Amino acid sequence: MATENNGSNFFTGLLLGGIIGAVLGLLFAPQPGEKTREQLREKADEFVSLGKSAWEEGKEAATQKGEELKAKLDQARHKLD
């Protein structure tokens, strides 16, 4: 169980670090403000897309785990009967 949490924490840290790094890189780059805002919008869209796919993967994994737990519970109930 601890390894699942570590994987989640790692992914969260990786995503957050990527966002912060991208924003800081764009803000300190020597270019016009309009171009910087455009790049920020593009990066935000990329991260939203990544977040949505991660959400879907997590939802899918949770559904699968729920089905596995339900099957185990049903098995245990049948053994008691």
Image (cartoon, helix red, strand yellow):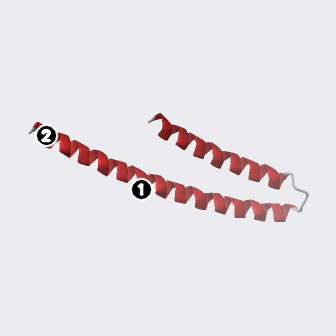
Say if mark 2 contacts mark 1, CB within 8 Å: no
Residues under labels 2 and 1: Cα distance?
29 Å
Q: Position of residue 38 (x, y in %)?
A: 77, 65
Q: Which of marks 2 and 1 is nearer the N terminus?
A: 1
Viewer-closest of 7 and 63:
7
Q: Give the quadrant of residue 73.
A: top left
Residue 50, label in figure: none
Q: Where is residue 15 in the image (x, y as percent from the top left)?
A: 64, 49
Viewer-closest of 33 and 78:
78
Left-right relation of 23 to 5? right
18, above or below 34, in the image = above
Q: Position of residue 35 (x, y in %)?
A: 83, 65
Report the quarter where the C terminus lies.
Answer: top left
| Residue pointed to by mark 1 | 60
Q: Give the quadrant of residue 9.
A: top right
Report the quarter where the N terminus lies.
Answer: top left
| Residue pointed to by mark 2 | 79
Residue at 59 percent across and 45 percent down: it is 12
Q: What element carries label 2?
A: helix
Q: Is mark 1 on a helix, strand or loop?
A: helix
Residue at 54 percent across and 38 percent down: it is 6
Left-right relation of 26 to 69? right
Category of crowding for the residue at label 1, using alpha-carbon neighbours closer than 10 angstroms: few (below 14), some (14–19), many (at least 20): few
Residue mark closest to the camera, 2 vs 1: 2
* Kind of residue at disc 2: Lys
